[in-house]
Amino acid sequence: MVDFKELIADSILSEELGLTKEEIMNMIEIPADEKMGDYAFPCFRLAKALRKAPQLIAADIAAKAGDAEAFAKVENVNAYVNFFIDRAFFAGEVIDEVERRGADYGKSDGGAGRKVIVEYSSPNIAKPFHIGHIRSTVIGNALYKLYDAVGFDVVRINHLGDYGTQFGKMIVAYRKWGSEEELAKEPIKALLGYYTKFHEEAKEHPELEDEARETFVKLEAGEPAELELWEKFRTLSLEEFTRVYDMLGITFDSYAGESFYSDKMPRFIQELKDKGLLIESQGAQIVDLEPYGLGAAMITKSDGSSLYVTRDIAAAVYRKEHYDFYKCIYVVASQQNLHFKQWKKVLQLMGYEWEKDCIHVPFGLVSLSDGDDIKMMSTREGRVVFLEDVLNTAVAKTAEIMRDKDAQGVDIEEVSKEVGIGAVIFQELSNNKIKDYVFSWDKVLNFDGETGPYVQYTHARASSVLRRAQDAGADVENLGSIDTAYLGSDSAYTLAKLIYRVPEVVIEAAEKYEPSIVTRHLVDIAQSFNKFYHDEHILVDDEAERNAKLALVKASKTVIANCLGLLGIAAPERM
Ligand code: ARG
């Protein structure tokens, strides 16, 4: 496809300006007001070197640059040269490119030959996979897809929280109050129950805490009885998580969680000692980070057991050695900002210069508005909502809405899954990730708002136009060469421009770790498509006009489906 900035730079390039093509391209602006053209080239900077008023320079350039087929008009307004792209030419370029690349439109290859790790979801096993984890899960999955789309080789890691003192508590509680049958029936709910009971009992019997600590030390030492129970908890929890991942269409390349690093830590503890970074504090080993305003990072406890940050140090080095990543992205809630700052600082002090390539991508909290009818559970941490219940509720509510709408020919059971789950994912991604936000069904499932269902509905609408055209005899699969002169209206042009920008938007979203840039653009495309749909008669009698408009509908449909796909959301044909 024509790179319009490049085309403009070529038309401006001349020896007397004394600028390289690259420099010209960087100077080209996109005017906020469309009346000032699609692109503008400011001439202020040239005045000094050329000893000429900038307006005159602009007028000279405009007079020379006008004749390319791609420009409808080139004119100067004061010191600017304004370029108006020929709308028919533009639409033709965009439509051809989408047609040619199909499902790959939006992808690029800037990342080729480099590896990126995206670590996400990472729930704590034996604890509920609650609504707070959903953000890490869906943001991480979108980042994986975005990095994949810009050409990187991406490794998806689920850094399971499958280790630590809480497993000592869980084992003690299970032995005292648990049962095999209970565990098999609803493992996570059962384990959570034991955990909660442990804390209740420990209030009266503080010696339980000691027992739990000793049990964890045994586990870390590899005692068979403890290991066996731990393994059982892990397997059962993972089965339950997998059910949720299946609903979301998410998979991982590795489930190497915290326990994976349990035997890899002595090396780093020794290394920290050798580098003179460890100091003793009340029996524990710490790295003093006071000089950096980061408190202290505890590396081992007084009983010798390891900590969360210790395992993260081991994990980072292991990943660097094993994968030789270009970037390692950690999608973890902003509540853990301090942890990640401390951990990065320790890696830096250890002399690992690649620490700068480890990136914590934080996100804000999800809270619930009162009166939302999601099943709640109360634990030591407060109200917990199971993600699976949220997804099931979303599907059930969507099915209800669809039944009310009496959607014809729609497989409600199937489509309500795509739309209900898609709605939750879209909602999670469309909030600028750093902000806290309040979850509300009315917002999530609003078919007319800036939501997943709205975008999916637009996709289904485009599909339906194409089906109707097909029924009326148009050869939608092969529209042949089209006369893009019919695509000169404002609404067609705005839509084509948004489609043109998709590859840049994908790159920007990946670079900024911000999937909401894609959701925002998708909403713009959907709104623009709907305006085109309302403003214009698409299925007109004139075949040339109809085919041109159908070609734009088809391109819109492809692009919406591709972008939804990058977010992990389905694009239903009917809804
Ligand atoms: N398991 C942790 C939690 O649920 C998140 C793990 C984040 N990843 C990491 N490498 N520390 O809070």
Image (tube, rainbow, N blue to C red):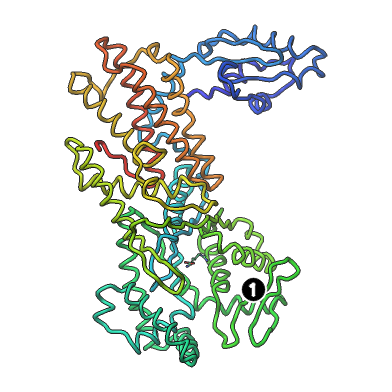
Residue at 34%, 54% (x, y): give it.
Answer: 248
Secondary structure type for disc 1? strand
Residue 325 image point, x, y percent: 54, 56
Residue at 34%, 45% (x, y): give it.
Answer: 445
Q: Is residue 191 visible?
A: yes
Residue at 62%, 77% (x, y): give it.
Answer: 298
Res 386 → quadrant: bottom left
Residue at 31%, 68% (x, y): give it.
Answer: 239
Q: Is residue 218 visible?
A: no
Asked if residue 337 lies left or right of residue 54, the reply is left
On screen, residue 330 above or below 221 = above
Residue type at mark 1 is Ala
On screen, residue 453 above or below 475 = below
277 or 211: nearer the viewer: 211
Asked if residue 146 lies left or right of residue 249, the reply is right
Residue 121 image point, x, y percent: 44, 60
Q: Which residue is mark 1?
A: 297
Residue 139 image point, x, y percent: 46, 52
